[in-house]
Amino acid sequence: MEFNLHQPPRNSSAHAAMHPPWRLARQSAVFFGERPVSPNIVPVAQEMCSWLQQKGHVTLITEKERESPLGLTNPYSYSASSLAAQLCSAINEMSDFINDDRETPSIETELRRIRLESELILQFARFCEAAIKQMLYCTAMDADIYNRATMGRLLAFDCLDCRKSGKPHLVSLLGALAHHYHNCITLETCLFDHLAFIGTRRNKEAAHSEAATPRYSQASESRIAAKEYLDMVGHELGHMCQHIGEIETKMIEEIKLWILHFPNAPSPEALMRIPVRVRDVLDNLDGSRSGES
């Protein structure tokens, strides 16, 4: 199946972006010979959500696994796993800074606060992008659409072909993922705004030549400000991981279902139990198979 940006949407978000239909590609699974054996994706958002609640750990995938016969071939899984671990490290370092009661020069403390906050928001945004792209890689979408996409472009981008034809509209790649699993309401009422907020903060505080300037003259003030910042970012991260994790969980369930029924297609009843938009999948089944090698 070709990912058709121009296909009329079956649902439009409150943020006026189209959610084009799609289906899973062959690369959504790890193959042993000609047989799919496991999902080609790591539940990074689910794991991060559990870690934030102190209920689990974050899996770190190394280059050694890439060399394994049954290693993941999804490049974004390695990036997302590494960024998740780096994000956990940044959160822990910020927490240590907040709870450090040693006497330190005020300007040194303030500059460290700025550095830690910049690193935290940067790692947060990069983790979000990798977690979303990991799922996009498992679809039949053209990689050129999302490969170098920033957070903003993953949320919504202008369809240039349709604009040239006088019918301008936006396309949301994250919206397409959510729509496939009946998660549009969550996207429109919560997740979209959380991710847009993080992207804006990243651009303002940690991108290009932009940087925060010192504000506090006392080390204690810097640590109080850092705690408020960590609480705010932690709140946003928790929401993001919960909602992206819901999409992630459903995608893994769907991949497992296709593996179980390979080389045949799962029944509409089985797909609906996830639930998946069955019409989007089965309408394009023949075209997808003919387009895959």
Image (tube, rainbow, N blue to C red):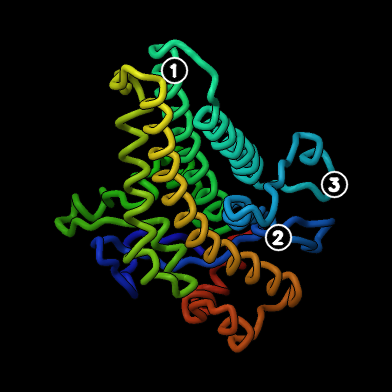
Mark seen at residue 132: none
The residue indicated by pointer 3 is: 69
Q: Residue at x 49, y 54 (%)?
A: 238
Q: Disc 1 and disc 2: Cα gap in Å?
A: 45 Å
Q: Amino acid at mark 1?
A: Thr
Identify the image quadrant of the C terminus: bottom right
Residue 133 is left or right of residue 81, and the answer is left
> Callout 2: helix, strand or loop?
strand
- Tag 3 and tag 1, C-beta contact below 8 Å: no
| Marked residue nearer the N-terminal end (2 or 3) | 2
Q: Amino acid at mark 2?
A: Pro
The residue indicated by pointer 2 is: 39
Q: Disc 3 and disc 1: Cα gap in Å?
A: 48 Å
Percent across and percent down for residue 183 are 44, 71
Labels 3, 1: front one? 1
Percent across and percent down for residue 202 are 37, 35
Percent across and percent down for residue 39 are 70, 60
| Disc 1 crowd, CA 10 A, few/some/many (<14, 14-19, 20+) | many
Labels 1, 2: front one? 1
The residue indicated by pointer 1 is: 109
**Toward which corner of the image does residue 272 lie, by quadrant?**
bottom right
> Callout 3: helix, strand or loop?
loop
